[in-house]
Each structure stands twice: as C-alpha cells, then as structure tokens.
Image (cartoon, coloured by chain):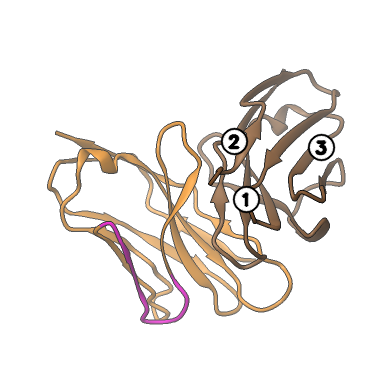
Chain colours: A orange, B brown
Amino acid sequence: GDSVTQMEGPVTLSEEAFLTINCTYTATGYPSLFWYVQYPGEGLQLLLKATKADDKGSNKGFEATYRKETTSFHLEKGSVQVSDSAVYFCALREEGGSNYKLTFGKGTLLTVNP
Amino acid sequence: ETGVTQSPTHLIKTRGQQVTLRCSSQSGHNTVSWYQQALGQGPQFIFQYYREEENGRGNFPPRFSGLQFPNYSSELNVNALELDDSALYLCASSLGAREKLFFGSGTQLSVL
C-alpha cells in the first residue's frame, strides 16, 4: 500500500538557518504530493503541493520538488523564522480511482529559536 | 467566512461506551473527511462523505460510522470504545472530493 516516510524529529534550528525536512514515498500509481503544517492548537493547513514529476510547490518561502526518480518530496526553506515553529506533515494522494484519502507521514516537529 | 468547527474540543469516555463527534463544514463545502491522529503519528483516513453519501473508507472497523446532513455538517460515531481509540479526531471540509482540504482543530478523545 501507499506510505510516506519523513525524517525523524524534533528538528531545532536558529533563526535564519536553512531548513530541510526529508520525505520519501511509496505509491502504486502517480500520486499528488503535499506538505501540511500544524501550528500549536490549530488544525492542519496546506502549505504546498505538486501534482506531477518535476513540479515545484512553493509558499511562504517554503519549496519542495516532486522527484519521481528518487520518490522524494523534500521540504526546504532558506531562512527560517521563529513563527515557522510547528509540526510538518508530508502526504500523498493517489490520483484516479474513487478513494480520495490522504496518506500522511508521522510528522516532523520544528522548533526555531531566536 | 466561517471555518471548520468541531465539537467538543475534549472528551473523556470509558471503554465500551459510545461517542459522537460533530463537525460543521466551511460555508459552501459539500465534502467532509474524517481522520484519526494518534499521539506522535500522522493523521489516518477514516472516511469521506460527499453530498450525504460515504465516498471512501480507510482501514477502520464498522464500529466507526458517520453521517452527513443536508447542510453538509457531519458526525463521527464510534461504538464499543477501546483504549486504542484515544486520539485527536480531525474533520476537514472541501468543495469537492479532490479539492483542497480545510481542517478543524480537532476533538481530543481519551478512552479510560
């Protein structure tokens, strides 16, 4: 079945540091890929997405590129801020068929210190 | 525009009891999805409702059931609660089955 593997956290960085959170996936078809963010006490929010190979999703300074050859969708940001502290989830959704579920990774807790 | 709201925010039940969780979808959204998020894990898909019909189901037993009402709000019912049902239950609404999900803040269920 489908699965998503994220790098284990927690990740602790200083403000303005470079961020990478690794994500790899296993899927039977051609999935769409997503990054969601969960701030403390809030629901998940879509951060960015990519729907086909070599697509780059970007939002709020975060980027991720859909790499079919390495089945990866790593999240990057050039300069993190304290306000980026949250839990980040990588997810996929198989396209085609009638099941529209998202399959999530376990999440990576990011803490950014001033 | 009102976002997705879930009630209650916290709930404590004992093993064997039944529970009903509620979700009001964002205005105009006709699709509701439910996810279970155990501590330290990612959300797992329970089921989705589209225009009052179940539109897909994850690997959860039949004691997990749901409803969607004509106003597109939704309920998640869990019978015969087990300790492992303790989790954060997330509801998400969308404009269609494959459209962007908008999540509520969840209901934290503890089963003792």
Position of residue A52 relative to residue B66, above or below, is below
Labels 2 and 1 positioned on one and the same chain: yes
Q: Amino acid at mark 3?
A: Asn
> In front of the other: label 3 or label 1?
1
Which disc number belongs to residue B27? Answer: 1
> In front of the other: label 2 or label 1?
1
Q: Name the side, left or right, on which A21 lies relative to A35.
A: left
Membership of A8 in magenta stretch = no
- Residue A63, given in percent of the width and then of the height, sits at 29, 64
Of mark 3 and mark 2, the one earlier in the sequence is: 3
Residue bearing the label numbered 2: B106
Of mark 3 and mark 1, the one earlier in the sequence is: 1
Residue A91 seen by the camera: yes
Q: Chain of mark 2?
A: B
Residue sitting nearer the eye, B25 or B8? B25
Residue bearing the label numbered 3: B77
